Image (cartoon, rainbow, N blue to C red):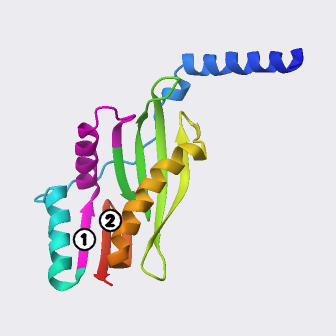
């Protein structure tokens, strides 16, 4: 390796150390304003159980899931994982998008993360997920970090849509609404 390449690496390492030392990578991205939580919402588990029962009974379902229910559900899942690499996750349902914010462990320390997912329904009733934005520490997240998480989510969705077709999916004002039927 030439000395000019070594010099560039030293400057890059010094630059990254200065940025991280100033807290640049730890600054959380701006999150949406929280919306009021409707009163008398069932627990996330109860809402999902009711939706499953409705599908078994009638063959159709309309699941209305509020972002406060999603946050409670995610927090319970994370609490069960002793080695969770993501903490303080917040979920928002806004303008056709699922917005995820949190803090992720990295070799450089805890870094703020933001992921924006746009789900769409395909003609055959499946859900297609597109990552519109993904940042870690304020810079674009490497695709390799996203691939594992999205593959797990796609696998879970594909198992579900093998038996059920999604007719519509709406996301706005803090709500995720899914209408589906048995295939």
Instruction: Please rate how many residues cluster around mark 2, counting C-alpha atoms within 10 Å: few if below 14, some from 14 to 19, many from 20.
Output: many
Per the rendering, the mark at residue 176 is 2
Return the x and y of residue 95 as percentages of the image width and height: 43, 63
Q: Is residue 139 rendered magenta in the image?
A: no
On the rendered structure, is 19 left or right of 168?
right
- Residue nearest the viewer, comparing 170 with 83: 83
Instruction: Please rate how many residues cluster around mark 1, counting C-alpha atoms within 10 Å: few if below 14, some from 14 to 19, many from 20.
Output: some
Quarter of the image with the C terminus is bottom left
Compared with residue 151, is residue 22 higher up or lower down, i.e. above or below?
above
Per the rendering, the mark at residue 63 is 1
Residue at figure coordinates x 68%, y 18% from the top left: 13
Residue 139 sits in quarter: top right
Return the x and y of residue 135 as percentages of the image width and height: 54, 42
Marks 1 and 2 in Cβ contact (< 8 Å): yes
Answer yes or no: is residue 90 visible: yes
Return the x and y of residue 171 as percentages of the image width and height: 37, 66
Residue 167 sits in quarter: bottom left
Label 1 to label 2, Cα distance in Å?
A: 8 Å
Residue extending furthest left? 40
Quarter of the image with the N terminus is top right
- Residue nearest the viewer, comparing 62 with 30: 62
Residue at figure coordinates x 23%, y 39% from the top left: 80
- Of mark 1 and mark 2, the one earlier in the sequence is 1
What segment carries the magenta color? Answer: 61-89
């Amino acid at each position: 390796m030439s000395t000019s390449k070594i010099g560039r690496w030293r400057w890059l390492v010094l630059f990254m150390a200065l940025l991280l030392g100033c807290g640049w990578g730890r600054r959380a991205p701006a999150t949406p304003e929280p919306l009021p939580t409707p009163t008398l919402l069932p627990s996330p588990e109860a809402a999902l159980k009711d939706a499953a029962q409705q599908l078994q009974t009638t063959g159709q379902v309309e699941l209305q899931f509020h972002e406060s229910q999603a946050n409670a559900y995610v927090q319970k899942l994370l609490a069960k994982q002793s080695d969770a690499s993501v903490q303080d996750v917040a979920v928002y349902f806004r303008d056709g998008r699922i917005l995820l914010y949190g803090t992720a462990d990295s070799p450089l320390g805890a870094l703020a993360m933001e992921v924006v997912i746009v789900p769409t329904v395909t003609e055959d009733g499946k859900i297609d997920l597109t990552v519109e934005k993904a940042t870690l520490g304020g810079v674009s997240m490497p695709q390799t970090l996203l691939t594992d998480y999205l593959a797990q989510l796609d696998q879970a969705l594909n198992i579900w849509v093998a038996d059920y077709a999604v007719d519509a999916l709406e996301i706005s004002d803090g709500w995720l609404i899914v209408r589906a039927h048995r295939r």
